[in-house]
């Protein structure tokens, strides 16, 4: 069996690519040279990540709908004084 010499960095990259396909580095080289290697499938979102993405999209749509009910340039005063204005008046 022939032997080739490669750097540690190249071997590490080769090992990662072989693991992505599910074969040993030697098998990966043989498959690559024969043209039988298929690129690994792209990663898919986990069900939890997909659910979070959908929830984020729904929240964004709701917030856009809510914001559409206010006139352009509208600002809401959310200061402590504004929130407790009636209570402060009652104390005076």
Image: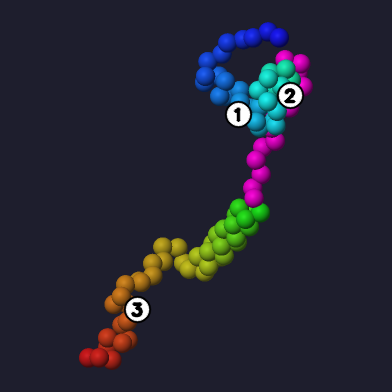
Closer to the camera: disc 2 or disc 1? 1
* Of marks 3 and 1, the one in the foreground: 1
- The residue wearing badge 1 is 16
In this view, the residue in front, 46 or 88, is 46
Give the CA separation, mark 2 to mark 1. Answer: 14 Å
The image shows residue 8 at horizontal and vertical percentages of 52, 19
Tell me which corner region of the image, top left, top right, bottom left or bottom right, holds residue 40: top right
Residue 1 or residue 68, whichever sits in front: 1
Q: Position of residue 79 (x, y in %)?
A: 32, 72
Q: Residue shown at 41%/63% (left/top)? A: 73
- In the depicted structure, whether residue 18 falls above or below residue 1: below
Per the rendering, the mark at residue 51 is none
| Above or below, comparing residue 69 to residue 53 in the picture | below
Observer able to see residue 61: no
Identify residue for label 3: 83
Q: Which of 80 and 66 is in front in this view?
A: 80
In the rendered image, the residue lying farthest to the left is 92
Residue at position x 64%, y 9% in the image: 3
CA distance separating discs 2 and 3: 65 Å
Q: What residue would you read off at disc 2?
A: 37
Which structural element holds mark 3? helix
Local crowd at mark 2 within 10 Å, few (<14), some, or many (≥20)? some
Q: Residues within 10 Å of mark 1 (few under 14, many from 20)?
A: some
Image spot of residue 5 (x, y percent): 58, 10
Q: Give the farthest residue toward the top.
A: 2
For the point 56% across and 13% down, which residue is it?
A: 6
Q: Eyeballing the image, is 47 above or below 4?
A: below
First in sequence: mark 3 vs mark 1: 1
């Amino acid at each position: 069996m022939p032997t080739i010499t490669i750097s540690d960095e190249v071997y590490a990259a080769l090992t990662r690519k072989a693991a992505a396909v599910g074969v040993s580095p030697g098998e990966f080289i043989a498959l690559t040279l024969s043209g039988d290697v298929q690129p690994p499938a792209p990663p898919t979102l986990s069900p939890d990540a997909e659910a979070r993405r959908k929830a984020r999209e729904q929240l964004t749509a709701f917030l856009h709908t809510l914001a559409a009910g206010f006139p352009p340039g509208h600002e809401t005063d959310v200061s402590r004084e504004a929130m407790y204005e009636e209570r402060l008046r009652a104390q005076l």
